[in-house]
Image: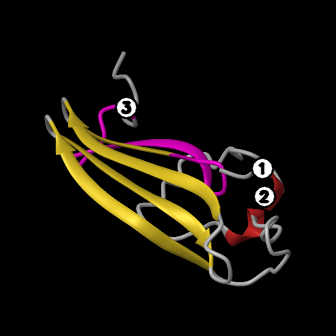
Amino acid sequence: MCNGCVHKEYPDRGNTCLENGSYLMNYVGCANCHQRDFVLISNKSTEDDDGEEIVTYDHVCKNCDHVIARHEYTFSVVDEYQEYTMLCMLCGKAEDSISVLPDDPRQSAPLF
């Protein structure tokens, strides 16, 4: 992974978790070949580890195959919530949790 290719390492993305793609607003350009071109995805793998889906891939420079960052995205269901996480030097870090129920119990107002 290369901190010379990004504006900010691991920017906080709130609850925006990317399963694929790249956060190009954080991309300065390739520190190896000094070009600012497309970022490709390579070495993508998906594994299911005890109910948790883990997607990993590399962001690489289109021109010289320099590895810009390693991307990791996870998805799991915990109790009654879908849990998402993302960790990547280019795309940032983020977490999200969404209820699988029609009405999220965390969003309802207390009755008393």
Whether residue 51 is situated above or below residue 39 in the rendered picture: above
User: Which quarter of the rendering shows the C terminus?
Assistant: top left
Taking the view exactly as shown, the residue that stands out farthest to the left is 50
Kindly report which numbered mark, 2 or 3, lies closer to the viewer in this rendering: 2
Q: Is residue 90 magenta?
A: yes
39 sits to left or right of 96: right
Dot 3: element = loop
| Magenta span of residues | 87-106
Number of labels in the image equals 3
Dot 1: element = helix
Q: Residue at x 40, y 30 (%)?
A: 109
**How many neighbours does mark 3 have within 10 angstroms: few (below 14), some (14-19), or many (20 or more)?**
few
Residue, disc 2: 6
Q: Is residue 94 magenta?
A: yes
**How many neighbours does mark 1 have within 10 angstroms: few (below 14), some (14-19), or many (20 or more)?**
some
Q: Residue at x 59, y 69 (%)?
A: 60
Asked if labels 1 and 3 touch by Cβ distance under 8 angstroms, the answer is no
Cα distance between the residues tagged 1 and 2: 6 Å
**How many neighbours does mark 2 have within 10 angstroms: few (below 14), some (14-19), or many (20 or more)?**
many
Whether residue 22 is situated above or below residue 51 in the rendered picture: below
48 sits to left or right of 55: left
Kindly report which numbered mark, 3 or 1, lies closer to the viewer in this rendering: 1
Q: Amino acid at mark 1?
A: Asn
Dot 2: element = loop
Residue 17: x and y in percent read: 48, 54
Asked if labels 2 and 1 touch by Cβ distance under 8 angstroms, the answer is yes
Residue 102: x and y in percent read: 21, 50
Q: Is residue 14 visible?
A: yes
Colour scheme of the picture: secondary structure
Residue 1: x and y in percent read: 65, 50
